[in-house]
């Protein structure tokens, strides 16, 4: 059982009209591993994530979660698998018409209806995990700073105890200090809750802090995969250019 990847993509391809945006993408993420997909703008990171989440259909290839092929599943079966997923959206995607605690417990109110008191308690526990106190429970997201909003979004992503959490550009819009705090929190949550993490980002600090392993997408294809420790001596010119943030190199 230990050999079954938590997530596996085999030969996934996707085109929009004549434009191939994913070309034969394959990778596997082990249980408990933190895996990050890097790549420049338009390289296909978001489309990869959307295919795994089932928000987009791949044209070819297979996607497996815990050894089950989700690309062959009926919608109800897919929902069962999707219940294992948590998601931290790029902008946080909090509902400003709802209080912080209602935002954190939003996924828990879908289907398994719990009483308000119980939900509030769950919100409090999860907010505590991300370093926020009970004083924020009744505030609206707009009353919080960007860094605090990100924490609330993190608390929401983990509140239903997902097995796999997807992080879409987790540090976007944060200054380096707050970005570092969020990166540390992600590392702690992944470790403490035994989560498998899949992130997409172009923030190198975030990549190095949160990932065990990295894959680089270039023009829709995986051009390198390896441990984070090898990123700075990958021997791959695309990775070098990305890591050093240079404008000269294979990517124009
Ligand atoms: N719904 C769509 N219809 C047509 N083209 C799309 C669609 N979604 C994405 N694309 C194209 O697919 C390519 C890959 O996009 P994607 O959003 O995955 O890039 P990305 O690596 O996430 O970039 P960024 O870092 O800028 O978010 C881009 O050329 C984009 O224009």
Image: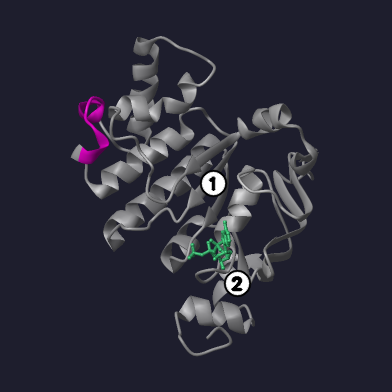
Where on the image, by quarter, is ligand 1?
A: bottom right
Is residue 147 positioned above or below 135 on the image?
Answer: below
Tell me if residue 140 comes above or below residue 238 in the rendering. Answer: above
- Crowding at dot 1, Cα within 10 Å, few <14 / some 14-19 / many 20+, comes out as many
Question: Regarding mark 2 in the picture, which secondary structure is present there?
Answer: helix
Q: Nearer the viewer, residue 212 or 246?
A: 246
Residue 60 percent coordinates (x, y): 79, 56
Decide if residue 182 is on the left or right side of residue 223.
left
Q: Is residue 118 left or right of residue 140?
A: right
Of the numbered discs in the image, which one, if any, rests on residue 85? none
Nearer the observer, disc 2 or disc 1? 1
Question: From this viewpoint, is residue 34 visible?
Answer: no
**Residue sticking out furthest to the front:** 17
Dividing the picture into quadrants, the one containing residue 47 is bottom right
Q: Position of residue 46 (x, y in %)?
A: 55, 57
Which residue position holds label 2? 230
Residues rendered magenta in the picture? 134-142
Q: Give 53 or 105, whichever is nearer the viewer.
A: 53
Any mark on residue 166, and which? 1
In the image, what residue occupies the spot 23% across and 32% down? 140
Residue placed at 65% from the left, 68% from the top?
Answer: 220
In percent of width and height, residue 185 lies at: 40, 46
Q: Earlier in the sequence, mark 2 or mark 1?
A: 1
Mark 2 to mark 1 CA distance (whole Å)? 23 Å
Q: Quadrant of the N terminus?
A: top right
């Amino acid at each position: 059982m230990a050999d079954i990847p938590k997530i596996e993509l085999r030969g996934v391809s996707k085109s929009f009209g004549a434009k191939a945006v994913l070309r034969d993408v394959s990778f596997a993420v082990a249980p408990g591993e933190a895996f990050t997909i890097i790549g420049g703008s338009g390289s296909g990171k978001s489309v990869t994530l959307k295919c795994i989440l089932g928000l987009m259909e791949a044209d070819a290839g297979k996607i497996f979660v815990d050894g089950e092929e989700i690309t062959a599943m009926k919608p109800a079966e897919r929902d069962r698998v999707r219940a294992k997923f948590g998601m931290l959206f790029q902008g946080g995607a909090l509902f400003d018409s709802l209080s912080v605690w209602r935002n954190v417990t939003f996924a828990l109110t879908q289907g398994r209806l719990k009483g308000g008191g119980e939900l509030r308690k769950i919100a409090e526990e999860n907010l505590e995990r991300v370093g926020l106190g009970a004083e924020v429970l009744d505030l609206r997201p707009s009353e919080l700073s960007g860094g605090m909003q990100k924490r609330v979004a993190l608390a929401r992503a983990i509140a239903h105890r997902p097995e796999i959490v997807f992080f879409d550009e987790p540090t976007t819009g944060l200054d380096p200090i707050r970005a570092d705090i969020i990166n540390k929190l992600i590392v702690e949550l992944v470790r403490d809750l035994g989560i498998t993490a899949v992130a997409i980002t172009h923030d190198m600090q975030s990549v190095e802090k949160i990932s065990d392993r990295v894959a680089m997408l270039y023009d829709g294809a995986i051009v390198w995969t390896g441990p984070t420790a090898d990123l700075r001596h990958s021997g791959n010119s695309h990775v070098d250019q990305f890591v050093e943030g240079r404008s000269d190199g294979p990517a124009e």
